[in-house]
Structures are given as structure tokens and as C-alpha cells.
Image (spheres, rainbow, N blue to C red):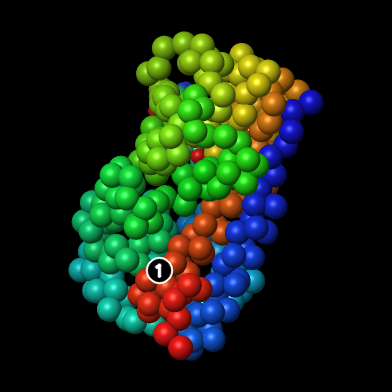
């Protein structure tokens, strides 16, 4: 029976660290603040927004929402970013994506102040990930994968890791973060030939392809460590990962569950980034206090 790599203890561990840093900020009269920008009323966005705000409360981070109609113009959105970039009371900014088609994401990505860009939307932060420069903000999901592996003491140095999926949000930046940890990284994608032969050779497989229960037993070996990033609906509308968890659990060394795995860590990383942004912008941090 493989081990379930649960996200909850990782979240608890990260939360304790965040709480102690928030305490220091508060003692110095600084209150970390996140602004969420939501365009329209997409159900997924509202669900994620609620979860982020609940977590903000838990961690004593001020969470605010700027709600805009789905008809908002580029000019209006540009003005919103200008205002919030300059508002010193706001430390972290995130806009829910995807955005309505009439809004040009390539322009919007450049509107956000990279120092407040806690979800790695700005090309400045993405470039830093690819340069191996840790002074920016990496995409939260990619970082959540690294955190779960580190928490469970899974060696990365020299490990053969296959990342299945090459999106700019998960697969590619994750491959870069794994390289920074000195792993030997391969990327698989929709045109990869005989993917099971590639993944079954790896020590660690990260699934980020967005296909419900796609990766079955043949993709793994007895010693595989599997991190499933996928969040999909199965035939019955239940949430499932990219890996067929029930079929694979017994056949691998360890695997993250689709619910309660990587996903719950992602939000905590986002809030860790808010606190980091606040520390950078105010110069107050646990190791260096103004007082
Ligand atoms: P995406 O659709 O942008 O990219 C999917 C990638 O998978 C592509 O690079 C594609 O080449 C590859 N792919 C598709 N079919 C494949 C196949 N049959 N074999 C090999 N590769 C294949 O998706 P994304 O935004 O990177 O998200 C991936 C998954 O992760 C989705 O299920 C998404 O819901 C989930 N996700 C989870 C979190 C989280 O916090 N846990 C965050 C973001 C995304």
C-alpha cells in the first residue's frame, strides 16, 4: 500500500511560519493586505475567492475584493491597476483568470507591479523563475509541489523527475524550480511518444495535464513518488486528479490525493507571498524590524 501524501500537515507547517511573521509585522504597526480583483461572476472565481478570504482571516491577513463587471474596459482595468499599485496599504494583488475575451492578458500581465504580483502574472516574475532568481514570486501551484516534496523529505538532488504538462502556469515553471533543487528534469506533454515508458522510469512523477484519471498503473513503478496537480471532474461530477488514484495507490511508493493534496497548499503559498510582499515593501520582517 502506497503512502498518501496529505497536504494538511504541510499547510499547518506553512501556516505556523506565516503566523509568526504576521505577528512581527503587526507589532510594527503593519497589517499585510491582499486585494483580489474579480471580473464578472464566474462560479469558480467566487469559490476560490471565498476560500482565500477564509484563509486570510485565519492568518490575520486583510483580504479585500475589487469586483468589476464582465464588461469592464481595458482603460478602466488599467486605471484600477495604477491605483492599487500605488496604494501603500495594499501589499499583494491577484486577478482571477481566465478573463473575458475582450481583455488582453498580454497587456494586463504588464500592468501589475511585480513586487505585489503574488501569483506570478507579471513577465518579470516569470523571467526570474527561469533565471533561477528567487527574489520574485513563482507560480503558487508549482511552489506547492516543491513544498509538499520537501515536507515529506523526498530527496530532489539528483532525482529523476518527470513533469507531465508544459503550461506556463504549472509545468514549465515547476520544471525550473525542480532544476533549482538539482533534480534531473524531463517534461512530457501531449505530443510525447509513449509517455508511460518515460514516467515509469522516474523517481518522481508530477501530473499536471488536466485529464481526469488519465494516468493509470502503467505510468508508474513500485518506487514512484506521484504528485497529482490535476483538478478535474470525473464522470459523476466528483473531483478527481490526473492520476487514477484508487487504481494506483497500491502500486506506488507514495501519492498525493486529488482533494486535500497539492490544491490546499496552493492557497497557503499565495498568502505566504502576500506576507513576503508586505515584508519587502515595508522593510519589516522577522529578522529585521524597524523598531
Ligand atoms: P493546461 O491545460 O494549461 O496544460 C495542460 C498541459 O498538459 C499541456 O502542456 C499539455 O501539453 C499537457 N497534456 C495534455 N494532454 C496530455 C496528454 N494526454 N499527455 C501528456 N500531456 C498532456 O493546464 P494547467 O493550467 O497546467 O493545469 C493542469 C492541471 O492542474 C489541471 O487539471 C488544472 O485544473 C490543475 N491545476 C491545479 C492547481 C492547484 O492548485 N492544484 C492549479 C492550477 C491548475
Q: Count the marks.
A: 1
Residue 257 quadrant: top right
Residue 155 coordinates in the image, percent (x, y): 57, 34
Residue at image point 26% right, 52% down: 123
In the shown orientation, is residue 288 left or right of residue 237? left
Residue at image point 34% right, 82% down: 88
101 or 148: nearer the viewer: 148
Q: Hey, which residue is sitting farthest right in the picture?
A: 1
**Residue 214 visible in the shown view:** no
Residue at image point 61% right, 19% down: 220
Residue 21 quadrant: bottom right
Ligand 1 under 8 Å from disc 1 Cβ: no
Is the residue 77 above or below the residue 166 in the image?
Answer: below
Residue 120 coordinates in the image, percent (x, y): 36, 54
238 or 115: nearer the viewer: 115
Residue 201 coordinates in the image, percent (x, y): 54, 15
Helix, strand or loop under label 1: helix
Is the residue 105 above or below the residue 211 in the image?
Answer: below
Residue 163 coordinates in the image, percent (x, y): 46, 29
In the shown orientation, is residue 233 left or right of residue 92? right
Residue at image point 43% right, 34% down: 182
Task: Tell me the residue that label 1 is attached to.
Answer: 277
Is the residue 95 above or below the residue 143 in the image?
Answer: below
Amino acid at each position: 500500500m502506497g503512502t498518501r501524501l496529505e497536504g494538511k500537515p504541510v499547510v499547518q507547517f506553512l501556516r505556523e511560519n506565516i503566523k509568526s511573521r504576521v505577528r512581527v509585522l503587526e507589532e510594527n504597526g503593519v497589517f499585510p493586505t491582499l486585494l483580489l480583483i474579480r471580473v464578472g461572476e464566474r462560479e469558480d472565481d467566487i469559490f476560490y475567492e471565498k476560500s482565500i478570504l477564509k484563509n486570510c482571516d485565519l492568518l490575520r491577513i486583510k483580504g479585500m475584493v475589487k469586483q468589476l463587471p464582465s464588461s469592464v474596459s481595458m482603460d478602466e482595468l488599467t486605471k484600477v491597476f495604477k491605483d492599487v499599485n500605488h496604494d501603500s496599504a495594499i501589499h499583494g494583488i491577484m486577478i482571477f483568470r481566465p478573463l473575458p475575451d475582450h481583455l488582453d492578458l498580454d497587456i494586463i500581465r504588464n500592468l501589475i507591479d511585480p513586487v505585489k504580483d503574488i501569483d506570478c502574472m507579471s513577465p518579470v516574475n516569470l523571467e526570474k523563475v527561469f533565471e533561477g532568481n528567487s527574489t520574485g514570486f513563482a507560480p503558487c501551484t508549482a511552489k506547492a509541489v516543491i513544498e509538499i516534496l520537501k515536507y515529506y523529505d523526498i530527496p530532489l538532488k539528483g532525482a529523476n523527475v518527470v513533469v507531465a504538462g508544459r503550461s506556463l502556469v504549472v509545468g514549465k515553471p515547476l520544471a525550473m524550480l525542480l532544476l533549482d533543487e538539482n533534480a534531473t528534469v524531463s517534461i512530457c506533454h501531449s505530443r510525447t511518444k509513449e509517455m508511460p515508458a518515460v514516467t515509469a522510469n522516474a523517481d518522481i512523477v508530477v501530473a499536471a495535464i488536466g485529464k481526469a484519471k488519465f494516468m493509470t498503473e502503467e505510468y508508474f513503478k513500485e518506487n514512484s513518488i506521484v504528485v497529482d496537480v490535476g483538478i478535474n471532474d470525473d464522470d459523476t461530477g466528483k473531483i478527481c486528479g490526473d492520476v487514477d488514484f484508487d487504481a494506483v495507490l497500491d502500486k506506488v511508493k507514495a501519492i498525493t490525493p486529488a482533494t486535500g493534496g497539492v490544491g490546499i497548499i496552493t492557497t497557503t503559498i499565495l498568502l505566504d507571498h502576500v506576507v513576503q510582499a508586505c515584508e519587502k515593501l515595508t522593510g519589516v520582517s522577522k529578522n529585521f524590524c524597524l523598531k
